[in-house]
Image (cartoon, rainbow, N blue to C red):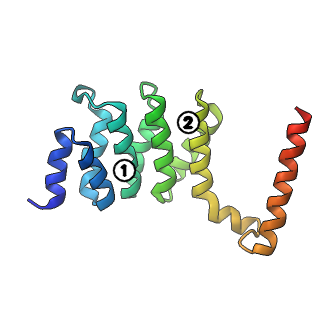
Amino acid sequence: MDEVEKLIEQLKEGKINAAKALGKIGDERAVEPLGQIFADDEGGHGDYMRSIAAMALGKICTEQAVGYLMWELFDSDSSEDVRYWAAEALGKARVKNRNSEAILFEVCINDKNERVRKSALKSLLEIKRKELLTVFGLEDERVRKPAAKSLEEIKRKDSEEQ
């Protein structure tokens, strides 16, 4: 039995450190057992364990891991903390997935919880960062600074109007 298999066994016993270690290792064999933490209502996994599992899945970066994270993000029974970390992990996953982008956008607009919306927005911006920089020509420092200044000006004007 190798190290990953041992950690998966510890994960099944509810060991939080095993979930953290599996995320750091990034082995694809851990995706299903980590995803099962979300699905296993009988396992008694608390929000903290589910949040750690979400972050571990985000570090593993596979389509299946992203699928578990999207599922958890839209699970109405899931707590604010778990949905927050699922959104955060999607931004870190670095898997090009149009579905995750659409779900993050949907969460940004419609989630009832402000913290979850902000996490989704942050992740969406992280996913789209390079694309946005290129589209707006912001990869050049000479363009980036005036653009940031313009955004600050817009923000200031918006706050004055309210």
Of 18 and 133, which appears nearest the observer?
18
**Residue 150 x/y as whole percent:** 86, 57
* Res 54 quadrant in image: top left
Label 1 and label 2: CA atoms lie apart by: 18 Å
Residue named by callout 1: 57
Amino acid under disc 2: Val
Above or below residue 9? Residue 74 is: above
Which residue is located at x 50 percent, y 59 percent?
A: 96
Return the residue found at the far left: 1
Horizontal relation, residue 82 to residue 156: left or right:
left
Indicate the quadrant containing the N terminus: top left, top right, bottom left or bottom right.
bottom left
* Res 75 quadrant in image: top left
Horizontal relation, residue 66 to residue 46: left or right:
right
Which residue is located at x 21 percent, y 38 percent?
A: 14
Above or below residue 75? Residue 138 is: below
What numbered label is drawn on residue 48? none
CB atoms at circles 1 and 2 under 8 Å apart?
no
Above or below residue 66? Residue 132 is: below
Residue named by callout 2: 116
* Secondary structure under the numbered disc 2 in the rendered image: helix
